[in-house]
Each structure stands twice: as C-alpha cells, then as structure tokens.
Amino acid sequence: MAVTDTSSPARPGKAASAEAEARLAAWLAAYRPLPGVPDELFDAAGQPRKRWLAFLREFAGYSPQELESRFGMSARHIRKSGASYRIYGEETERSWPLDPLPLILDQGEWDQIAAGVAQRANLIEAILQDLYGAGKLVADGALPAAAVTGSPDFLRALQGVKPPGGRFLQLYAADLGRGPDGRWWVMDDRTQAPSGAGYALENRLVVSRAYPSLYNNLNAHRLAPFFDALRKGLSGAASRADPRICLLTPGPFSQTYFEQAHLARYLGFLLVEGDDLVARDGKVYVRTIAGLKRADVILRRVDADFLDPLELNAASRLGTPGMLEAIRAGGVAVLNMPGAGVMESRALLAFLPSLCRRVLGEELKLPNVATWWCGQPHEREHVEANLDQLTIAPAFNLPEGAALGRPRLVADLTPDERAALQAQMTDRPGDFVGQEVVRLSTMPVLRDGRLQPTPFMLRVFAAATPDGLKIMPGGFCRTSDGADVRAVFMGEGARTADVWVIDDKPVERLTLIAVGDEVKVRRILGHLPSRAADNLFWLGRYIERTEATVRLVRSLCTSLMASESALHARGETFDCLRRLLVDWGALDGATPEARALDAARASLHDERAWGSAISLVHAARRTASGMRERLSADFWALLLELEADLAGGAEALASEGQVLEQVENALQHLAGLSGLAQENMNRVAGWRFLDMGRRIERGVNTCQFARTLAHDQATVDDLDLLLDLNDSQITYRARYLEGLALTPVRDLVMLDPFNTRSIAFQIETLKGHLAVLPTLLEDGILEEPSRILLPLAAELETADARALGADRTLAIERALMRFSNAVADRFFLQGANAVPTVKLVGLA
Amino acid sequence: MIYGLRHRTTYSYQEQVSFARCVLRLTPRSSPTQTVLESRVAVTPQPSAVVEKTGPFGAQTITVTVDKPHLALVIEASSRIDVHVPPAPPADQSLPWEAVRARALESHDLRPEGPAAHLYPTHRTPQTAEITDYARRSFPPGRPIVAAAAELMTRIHADFRYDPGATEVSTPVAEAFAARHGVCQDFSQIMIVGMRGLGLPTAYVSGYLRTIPPPGQPRLEGADATHAWVGVWCGDEAGWIGFDPTNAILAGNDHIVLAIGRDYADVAPIDGIILATGAQTLKVEVDVVPEA
C-alpha cells in the first residue's frame, strides 16, 4: 500500500518519522476487510479513506510504548476516578473497555445521519402525541391497536395528558448500523430513558486527553455544546425560571449508575432516588436539609413502570407515590414523558415507513431494519414462508413469561425449538416480528498492535431544545469482539470507541462566556438533599471509626513513646485494648486471641467482623458510591486505594513489623482523605455533614477511650496508651515534664479546646456547623440538635478534669449519641417509611 | 333488578399514621348492562385533597390525601344500581374462536373497552404454557367462542377446589393452578391466562354477587364479599360476555360490575401508600341488598 504523503506537521525526528511510516504501512498492508461487507477504513475500491489516513498517519507517530503511556494512562485515570470504575466484588456495573481508535465520520456523511435521526425523532414525537392524544392513527387504520397495546409502556394512565413542557421526547437515541449497500440503517429506537450519552462523554475525555494535538488538528466536533443544549432543553420544560432539575436514578445497583452520576455531575443536576422525592398537591419536591424544595424537571433513568407505585407497578421501590398525579396536574415535567417507551416496540418498526409518509409527508431518510409484525395475516404469511432467512424477535418488551427472550436467527434453532416457536406464533402471532438479518459494516480497531476490521453499531443522540432538535456530533460506538457481522450477534457489544465527526473547516472554539444569557452569580448550589447529607454524615463516621480502629491496632504492636515497644501487647493493657476492639465489633469476643499479633490481624482484616477496619472501609466505600457526584475524583480514588491496600494485605501479616507497615500506610491514606475533605471540598452544607459525622464519631470514640483508660484507678500504662490513641504524646510531653498524671492527661484529651483531638474541640466544631445550617421554621426556637449540643458545650467548657470520672464521661458519650440521632431525625429521610396499605382480603 | 350496595373498608393502625394517599376504585359505572342510580364514597377522617377522574380503564377513580395523624381510616362506598344484562347469544351462533383472535388483532379500537387492550400478558397474568395447554382442550378448531369459553369455565369449576383460606390476593396464578384450588380471583386469572395464551381478549372483572341466604334464614349484615369473574370478547357484535368460573354460570343479573381491567392491579378497589411505623389491619364489609 503506497502511502507517500509526508506533508503532515509535527514530525519529531527523521528516524521516528521513518518508523511511523513503516508502522502505518504495516498496518494497512495487513488489514483485510471482510468480503462483501463495507469497511470504514477502506473504500469499495480497496483504497484507504482520506479522513482515516489523516488520523492514522499521525497516530502511527506514537510508538507502542508512547501509545500505552498516553492512552493507557488516560484511560486508567479516567476510569478509576471517573464514571465507570467497577467496584471490586460488586460488578453490577457494565464495563466498556475503550478502543484506542475512534470511529471517524466526515461531515457530509454525518449531515445525512443527523438529518435522518432528527426526522425520526420528530416522527416519533408526532406519533406519541397522537397515541396519547387524538388517537387518529389507530382509529383511521394506519396502526392496529394491538401493535400498540402490547407494550407495557403504553400507559393508559397518561392518556389524554399533555406532557408538561410540551414534548414526550427530550432525549432520543437511535442505534445505527451501516448495511451492505453502504447506507446507514436504524436497528432500534431508544425512547424510554436512553443510556450511553454519559459514556460517550467519558470516552471523549479519555481520547482527547490521550492525543490532544491529534484531536485538535483533525477538527473533530466538540460534544460540550450538545450537553449545553440538553441542559437548556430541560430548563425550557420547566414552568418557572431558574428551575431545579433532578436526574432520577434507580440507585447504585443500576447497571449504568455511574454513567448517571457522571452525567448529573457534568450537567449540574441533583442526582435523586425515588424516595428523595415527595409528591404533594400536584407538585414534586426534593427532601433537603432545609425542608421540601420544588423539583421542576426530572430527567428520569427509571423505567416508567416503576415511577409511581400508587398508579403503576405497586411493587416498585424505585418510584414516588403520586408522581403521575403531579404530571397530570402539570406541576412537574418528567422526561422523557412516561409512556414514551411504547415507541421501543419492534412491532412499530414495521409501521414507521408508512407512518412517516402519512405523518410527515416524506420518506424515512434513514431506513429501519425491514420488519414484519406477525399480528397482520399477510405479514405473518411472509414471515412463515421465509422463516429460515429471517430473525424472529419479540414484538414487545413484555414483562414476564414472554415466549422469546431475545431475537433469534431461525436458521440456528434446533428442530424442537423451531417447532415450539411455530406453535407459539400460531397461538399468539402478535407477539412476534420477523426481521431481515442485518449485516453490519466494519471499522478498524487496534488489537495486539495490529489493525483489524470489526463489526460495530453506533448510538446517536438527539436532544430537544427551545431552538429545535440538536444532534450530538459523535455518539456511543460499540464494537464486537468477534468477526460475525450479523447484528443479532452483537448483543450489547463488547467494547466501545469514541466517535469523531470531522469537519472540513476548523470547528468553532468554545468560549467560556455564555452569550446572550444573563448568568446569575451563585455561591451555593441549591439545598443539599437529605439523602446526600445522610450519606456524607455516615461517610465521615465510617472514616473516623476506621482511623480509630487502625490506631487501636497500632497500639497492639507498638508503644509510641515508651522505651519498651511491646508494652501494650500483654497484661492488663492488652486486655484493655482487646476489650475495646471486641466492644465495637472489630474482634469476635468468642475466641479470645492469645497473641497481640492475632488480634491485630483479625481487627484489620476479618471481613466477618462488622467493626474490623476492612469492614468499615467497605461500608465507607459503599456509602460513598451512592453519591459519587458529590465527591472529588481524588477522594474516591484514595478511598478505593485504601480499600484495595487493606484487602490485599491480609496475607502478608507474619510479624508485628508488617502490621505496623500496613497500619502506617492506612493512616497516611486516612490523613490524605481528611486533607482532601478539608482543602478540596467547598465549605457548603455537604462538607459540614461529612465533618459533623467525623466529629461525632471522634468525640464518642474519645469518650470510650477516656472512660476505659482514664478512670479514677488508671495506671501509667493506661494513660500512655490513651495518649497514643489520642495522638497527643508530643503535646503532653512538651507541656508536662513531670511525667504522666491522671488529671493533666484527662484535661488534654477531653477538655483542651486547642487540642484538635479533644472532646471539647469536637463539640466546639459541631457547634460551629450547626450554627450555619438551615432551620426549618423561622420562629427563633432552637431545634433539637442545638438543644442537646449547647448544654454539652457549656458543660465541657466549665468542667474540671478532676471530676471527669468514667460516669461523667459516659454521660457525655451518651449525649453525643443523642445528638447524632437528633441530627438524623432533623436532617435525613427520617421515618419516611412509605408502605402500601394492606391489600384486600376476603375475595369470594 | 335494583340493588343497594354498601362496601365499607376499615384500616386500623397500631401507631398513628401521619399521611395517607389512596386511589379508590369504588364507584360503579353505568354501561349497557347496568345503570348506576346513585353512588357516593365517604372517607373518614376528612381528606385534605380529593381528586376525581376517569381511570385508565374507564372506571371512576378518586384519589384522596389524608395528612393529619389518624389511627383508623374508613372508606365507605354506597350505591344503588339497576342491573339489566341481556341474555347471552346462543352459544352455537357465536363466531369461531379463531376468528375472534384474528379480529382482535385487526381492531382499530384503542379504548380500554376494545379487545386489543386485553390481549397481552401482565405482571399478574403472565403467559404460562401449562395453563394455555389446559385451556386448549376446550378450543378445538372452529368451535364457537361462547361454547368454548363456557366449557373452559365449567372445567375450571369442576377441576379446582374452592378454598377461601388457600390463597391470597398476591398468590401467583401458576401456584393456584398447580395446587388446583383457590377463590374467585384465582379461577378468573386461570381462565384469563389460558385464553390469552390462545390469543383471545379476556378481561378481569371485579364486582359483587348477590348471595341468597339459605331458606328461612335472614341475610347476614356485612357478610357478602367482593367478587371477580372474566369478561370474554366475542367479536364486535356480541361484545363482552361475562363468565363466572367460580360458580360456572354466565354473569347475569346477580352480578354487579364495579370495574374492568387486565388484571387485579387495574381494578383493585383501594391502592394506598401510608407513612406508618406500626402494624395495620384491614376489615372489609360488603352488603348487596336487592330492592323488592
């Protein structure tokens, strides 16, 4: 293959350049497009296309090492801190390994795709307006009623309801493939709650970071304007200015949760779950720490059936009772409008070509896969006559008991399966469609240093805005692992690629200045939702408790100041430590460890003990994973590292020295987390709840240490241990040259307002937080948390260390626990046990 | 025949309930087979909001919100209804069942009373091969739909034991089918699943059945119950005909229709969500009193 254009800029040296030329030539020479299948890289005449050559020529300039360094690092970094990191042992999240090569489309081709997708979005919008409105398409015979009613997403409860905001579709996606004739075909419509836009964004982040100059040189269209348009479109659906927009997620167990969290963070929406919301008086509200706040627009990722247990699926735990009533009242715009999912039925693909002529008066610009709905006698005959050449697929996404789970090639069925399918098609023909077998085109991917053709599908997104439809110039491209180009075998796809739409002229630079819009200056982004406050609070508590546990373990292995380092590993002090560890669940009290090393090992790594360090870190990570959009990427990455280090260290604990090494490592990570929380989080309400959690936990723990180790009969060893746990050895020794004595130790650990680890300091800090958090009523009466905290603060301010025996300390500890409960009652989703009424009994 | 109806539901709570929102489907509707003369629904305590509308399947629904603390919620529906069901067409003169299946697929009627609304499986009436095969024996080629459905109804009545304690409202249809017992809801669901499995439009009908006290004994107050049976679409002309597999009779002037839907979920008399911490109990009293 002759590739001789050497005019491209930015060549490093001659040798490197020659190497790059050789690499490119080798790639192209070894590339074998599949026979009879169009390929993105090579045209029908066997020549590489210009846009790909332009890309590959620069791309070949990266040596394998440089590519690994650029792409691998970027991908790892983004994956780890970004949207789709899979959690160890909880792999519900679909991972999409990213190919280093993007799919490259030129402007001319893209314009056709964009026009076709826009036409389709408009067509589907018009059909939805008719189905839920006048119903003329069915009444006039253009669409059989049974081709509509088979979809569980045909929601009669919303029949006749005008969507608040005016539109059914806010975000639409089409799955495209390029057929053997080189044309693009639509394989599926996504109208319920299309996923993938967030992944597309993430892929773009990785690739543009990996090869910034390549990306800039090629004039690839930016994705950001599309997301701006999406945001504008959603704002436009609200009935008031400056609306509160929420992204409704099914929660952390959803397959695409991290995409949702990523989108929410990127777009600046509140990420909420069903029970964060309350429907009242025809409106929907978010529960926040400042009470109920109106939700104007909800971008939903929850399927319609689960939205409202009162009117739809009563078994749903993901929805908000009364949501449909609020939609009918026009008090909230839920997008896409519940019921829009009806257009995902394959049965309707059969009717779209004729509906397009009827509704829009034009032909479909992008054909869809030829589809025959077997509910019609002629179509069924056609399918039966050509059974072996077709794919048979479910006509609707039926709930359960559906005969056919997924599309099947009839030719691949066993005789028994085939007979069963035919019998089912006789009984219930309307449940099936026949579809032609779609063959996909191929695009180049880089595998093991070589270019290979691989089948792919492209998801393209359209967003409705006040200025019309906007199409994302790019998309979510899924590539297959195998070489079978029949679309039915793609399934959900195995890998993914970024999609570049290359303009002939330089693309418009984005400026940071929002033109034409008056941007109001804000310092606080709305009110913190109660669930987020709850999670942050507990994250703070878990992290602090982990730290305390790790400090206890450290003390098992060493004494920081005493000349004899194994001081705490035996005798009464060891018993004390072990009792503390047993008391808070780090150790199983039933089998008392004889050696300090065994106790240390168990307290760090025993996954069955709910209070062990590893269990606490798991809990912290789970809590954090429910609000990823509120934590910085660094914070999350550090937390995962701590978890991985602790989990990985279980085997390597043969000596006290190794325990110490792990403990010090863990403490450094924990200090890093504190540092990030202090320095990198905005001092808004979210940070305050994280810090309140920490302060309460530290206060309670210190009380526990103090009443165990600084009671009236405490020994010198006890006090030494207490100073270790309180991290106050140096301070104490600098202040008191006289050596360890009970009262000064107590004063330092409990009452000293300058010691950041004293109880008094925690309570002063808590007081500061409470003073700036919102109150529910402006009646000047103190709320319960303040009523508990303020007397406690006064007590510690005026207390005398001599009088702080175990009983008084216990009373302080209990007051802190009461305070914690009062904070939970006041700010979190308190008592929100929405339960269904018992069902009817006594049916005859 | 004119009936006076009273349907009283009492929820009692162990702890105060601060908030309740209920969807009530307790208002009977006039249709070609019955005329509602009067109807009203009373809720205690007094709701803070009441929204009335026509529900997805045509029945009048009332959504009530109670937002003051209460220990009991009482919902009483009462009505007077004139029932005048025309005699069913002679079984042999109805359409062959395959023709009914074909016409249902062709229908241009998207309304809830059209056949297309009742063709497909639902959460509570999932397609179940065993039940379809059980039903199939009553549907040999060319048999008129009314005759075939009547035979299936009679077989269910004969093959299944009526046992009020055996199932609950949430018992899956396959379970009741396998155990060969149940109450009106189970029998109706079995007939629905069997016939829908053959592509035939069938509906779940909830309502009341006049009970005739044993000779010489007075009618017991509150002792009647809500009832369920099956609507079968028999073609455009014959329309919907009611089959009661619990009693092996066609629905006639003893059957008073409350609501029609695809399954129980569409017609449940009350769906409620409460904010509650304690246990709850439910009492239902129904009186169906024929006027002289």
Image: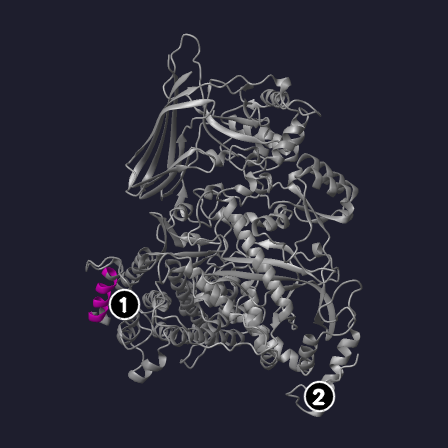
User: What's drawn in magenta, residue-wise?
Assistant: A787-798
Going by the numbered disc 1, the residue's amino acid type is: Val
Residue at the spot of label 2: A17
**Counting residues from the N terminus, which is met first, the one under dot 2 or under dot 1?**
2
B240 lies left or right of A28: left
B95 lies left or right of A694: right
Furthest residue toward front: A361
* Vertical relation: B276 (above or below) A5: above
Return the x and y of residue A379 as percentages of the image width and height: 70, 41
A17 lies left or right of B57: right
Query: Which is the main secondary structure of the residues drawn in magenta?
Result: helix
Residue at the spot of label 1: A772
- Residue A414's image quarter? top right
Q: Is residue A335 magenta?
A: no
Return the x and y of residue A142 as percentages of the image width and height: 60, 42
Return the x and y of residue B115 as percentages of the image width and height: 57, 33
- Residue B181's image quarter? top right
